[in-house]
Image (cartoon, rainbow, N blue to C red):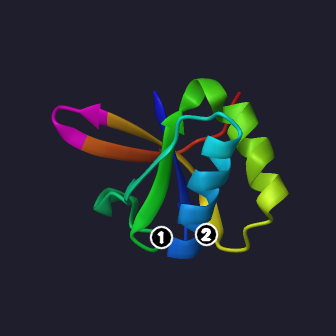
Amino acid sequence: MMILAVFRSRAHSLDYAERLRSFGVDATTMPTPKEAKIGCGLCVRFDARVFVRAQAILKIGNYSSFKGFYKIDFNGGRVVITPYKRI
């Protein structure tokens, strides 16, 4: 499962992706899916298996424009975006 970190700032999205990579997390920036109806147009995608690490790294950055974590699923060829909270 893939997780999206959504920001209101392109600069914060790019900085967070770079920070994740510097801590060994495989992360990429991508256009925020229109189904999310949020954000600046860029989000950061990473694997859910590293969520705890990614969440800790987010706190280090103190990103004021952070909107939230979302999981991305595909259902019948449609993109489904839902808020993600690890249980």
Kindly identify the residue that appears in the image at 56 percent across and 29 percent down: 48
Kindly identify the residue that appears in the image at 61 percent across and 43 percent down: 21
- From where the camera sits, is residue 60 visible? yes
Q: Quadrant of residue 42?
A: bottom left
Crowdedness of circle 1 by 10 Å Cα count: few (<14), some, many (20+)? many
From this view, report whether residue 39 is shown above or below residue 84. Answer: below
Kindly identify the residue that appears in the image at 80 percent across and 43 percent down: 56
Q: Quadrant of residue 15?
A: bottom right
Per the model, the C-alpha gap separating discs 2 and 1 is 11 Å
Residue lying farthest to the front in this orientation: 22
Residue 8: image x %, image y %? 55, 74
Which residue in the structure is indicated by mark 2? 12
Q: Earlier in the sequence, mark 2 or mark 1?
A: 2
Q: Main secondary structure of the magenta part?
A: strand
Q: Contact (CB < 8 A) between labels 2 and 1?
A: no
User: Which quarter of the rendered picture does the C terminus lie within?
Assistant: top right
**Mark 1: which amino acid?**
Gly
**Mark 2: which amino acid?**
His
Which residue in the structure is indicated by mark 1? 39
Q: Is residue 56 left or right of residue 21?
A: right
